[in-house]
């Protein structure tokens, strides 16, 4: 028995290591697939919430509206950033102009998030109370909306900058 024990332990160790590696590879492949295909992310969430076809289509439409709003806001942020940099490059800083630019950016974000709240509320009204509760629970998770619309998680977005 003593001669067999090391071989048995080696076999068990190999099996555990192979299972761990297979799990890690599967997780990474699934994460990449979900990151690259918005319809798969929506389908996964729809399955988790037991959405019907109409509700899933509404979730996809919501995602597209959120993505379009995000892109629009980013374009405006880029313009404002360029104006702020131009202001910083001047020999005399116009503090009032800087404050105006910053207020405009804040107002645009507030408008966009208010519009998104209305769109989200309309979508939630189409769900059953159980689906709505499950969605709102998931919405409390960090980066839930970023993952839903297809933006990289904050940790990845920061590391790629």
Image (cartoon, helix red, strand yellow):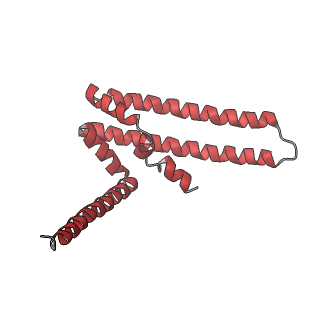
Q: Could you tell me which residue is drawn at 83 percent across and 41 percent down?
A: 93
Task: Answer above or below: position of 126 versus 28.
Answer: above
Q: Is residue 56 left or right of residue 62?
A: left
Task: Answer above or below: position of 119 versus 25.
Answer: above
Q: Quadrant of the C terminus?
A: bottom right
Q: Is residue 158 left or right of residue 56?
A: right
Q: State the image quarter where residue 136 is shown.
A: top left
Q: State the image quarter where residue 5 is shown.
A: bottom left
Identify the residue at the far right of this view: 91
Q: Could you tell me which residue is drawn at 45 percent across and 44 percent down?
A: 146
Q: State the image quarter where residue 63 is shown.
A: top left
Q: Could you tell me which residue is drawn at 27 percent across and 40 percent down?
A: 48
Question: Looking at this view, is 139 or 26 the one in front?
Answer: 26
Q: Is residue 84 left or right of residue 134?
A: right
- Residue 50, image x and y in percent? 23, 37
Tally the marks: 0
Can you see residue 65? Answer: no
- Residue 101, image x and y in percent? 71, 37
Q: Quadrant of the N terminus?
A: bottom left
Can you see residue 111? Answer: yes
């Amino acid at each position: 028995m003593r001669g067999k024990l090391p071989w048995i332990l080696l076999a068990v160790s190999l099996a555990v290591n192979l299972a761990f590696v297979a799990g890690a590879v599967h997780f990474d492949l699934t994460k990449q697939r979900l990151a690259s295909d918005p319809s798969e992310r929506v389908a996964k969430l729809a399955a988790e919430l037991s959405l019907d076809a109409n509700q899933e289509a509404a979730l996809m439409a919501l995602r597209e509206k959120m993505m379009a709003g995000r892109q629009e806001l980013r374009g405006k942020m880029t313009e404002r950033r360029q104006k702020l940099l131009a202001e910083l490059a001047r020999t005399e800083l116009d503090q009032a102009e800087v404050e105006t630019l910053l207020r405009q950016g804040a107002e645009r974000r507030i408008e966009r998030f208010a519009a998104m709240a209305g769109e989200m509320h309309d979508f939630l009204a189409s769900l059953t109370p159980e689906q709505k509760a499950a969605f709102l629970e998931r919405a409390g998770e960090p980066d839930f909306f970023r993952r839903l619309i297809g933006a990289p998680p904050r940790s990845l977005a920061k590391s790629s900058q």
